[in-house]
Amino acid sequence: MTDSGWNIDPGSSPPTRDHAWFPAPQPSPSQSARPPWPESGPGPVAHGVAPAAPPIPASTPVPTPPSLQHRGGPGRFVGSLAIGVVLALMIGFVAGRATSSNSPSASIARAMAGAQVTPAASSTAPLKGNEVEPVAAVAKVLSPAAVQLQGANDLGSGFIYDPSGLILTAAHVVAGNSTMTVRLNDGTQVQGKVVGSDEATDVAVVKISTGKTLPVARLGTDAPVQVGQLAIALGSPYGLTQSVTSGIVSAVGRTIPSQQNNMVAMIQTDAPINPGNSGGMLANRQGQVIGVNDSIISNAQSGTEAGSVGVGFAIPIGLAKSVADKLVAGKPVEFGYLGVKTKDADGTHVGGFVASVEADGPAARANIQVGDVIVRVGDSPVASGTDLAAAIRARSPGDTVRLTLFRGGHEQQVSVTLGRSSN
């Protein structure tokens, strides 16, 4: 049941998935000494896994992995068939945040940080979308703005979105840090200040000052996002900077719990997102950022690494930019508030069943009643109580929204002016 109108009752929410966090880096660990990864944290979506093991030399036969723990490293080609069989037999999944703690291969990643990277040409002009190699074209346009972020415990990604040196990333990437080491596209490392973060949406902003003109990623805040369109992810999976993967948008408006178990409507993609990708870009074929890569669902089990199985989630760029603007301005991050408690409807109509209405709240003033089933917010369908929570949360305090509901078998529409909530 929702809390004050938009947190879902544990009894009606999806099965809880473990929220994994990982230990601080150890100096030059060996692969044989890799520690088991502890589990902690409040939310069902976790975002951290250690980088993969060092690559095997070309002269060494590639072994078939005995388990899925090597899917991000050696044996990934031979192991792909085994992975497919195992995945087909799996019953459940564990969600993992796409940050990267340090393990043996993290030492390699840090060593690679000293290598010089040839910067790609920077451009802010939109792509036409008809390039022969669209992924390559997008990578050329956006890679200059991609950065790697390193804090006390985690490696993550981010991207420069403002020429003043503002970087968008995920809140869990910067958690517990006031400064971050930022590695730019050309290999330069500078110190960045954490301007602010909002755990409810998992959005954070870091600021750097370099004294030079910085490349900026184009944000597609008004770009339509539809199922099946090309999706390109840029970031530093497993500490491997300037990595690019591609796939499609698998779903939009997918309701996923944030770290604080608040509901956020995210973009789902099958573009491979792995540990270290958190905070990086998800872009369309026009070279516009449509989302901030945030979390994955993986088949990791206790004692094994989490990795991509083609189910990743990104925070829509419109929401991320709105939160970032408030953080930079020093304003509180607030969300729309309806003032009801809901659960999933289990009758004739699919939607959010109103279990209680707060006295003198926005819903009460709009004459929403217990027993109503809300099926649409504006033009967006609502399939569950979590969908309703995410849809309301995506609006701002003071917004007037049209709700479509069923009462006594009859469809009605009501207009509600939303209140405010800060969590």
Image (cartoon, grey):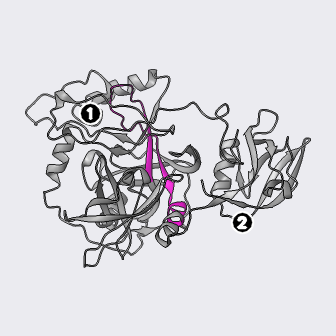
Q: Are marks 2 and 1 in contact (CB under 8 Å)?
A: no
Q: Could you tell which of marks 2 and 1 lies nearer the N-terminus?
A: 1
Q: Amino acid at mark 2?
A: Asp
Please tell me whether residue 214 is drawn above or below residue 237 in the rendered image. Answer: below
Please tell me whether residue 230 is drawn above or below residue 21 in the rendered image. Answer: below
Residue 88 colored in magenta in the image? no
Q: Which residues are magenta?
A: 293-322
Q: Position of residue 61 (x, y in %)?
A: 13, 28
Please tell me whether residue 163 is drawn above or below residue 314 in the rendered image. Answer: below
Snapshot quadrant of residue 64:
top left
Snapshot quadrant of residue 138:
bottom left
Q: Position of residue 106 (x, y in %)?
A: 21, 43
Q: Nearer the viewer, residue 2 or 345?
A: 2
Q: Is residue 351 visible?
A: no
Q: Is residue 406 visible?
A: yes
Structural crowding at the residue carrying mark 1, measured as other residues with C-alpha within 10 Å and reported as few (<14), some (14–19) or many (≥20)? some
Which residue: 85% across, 51% down? 368
Which residue: 50% across, 45% down? 259
Mark on residue 270? none
Snapshot quadrant of residue 364:
bottom right
Residue 297 colored in magenta in the image? yes
**In front: mark 2 or mark 1?**
2
Question: Which residue carries the number 1 mark?
Answer: 76
Q: Nearer the viewer, residue 271 or 406?
A: 406
Mark on residue 399? 2
Q: Nearer the viewer, residue 190 or 242?
A: 190
Which residue: 18% across, 50% down? 110
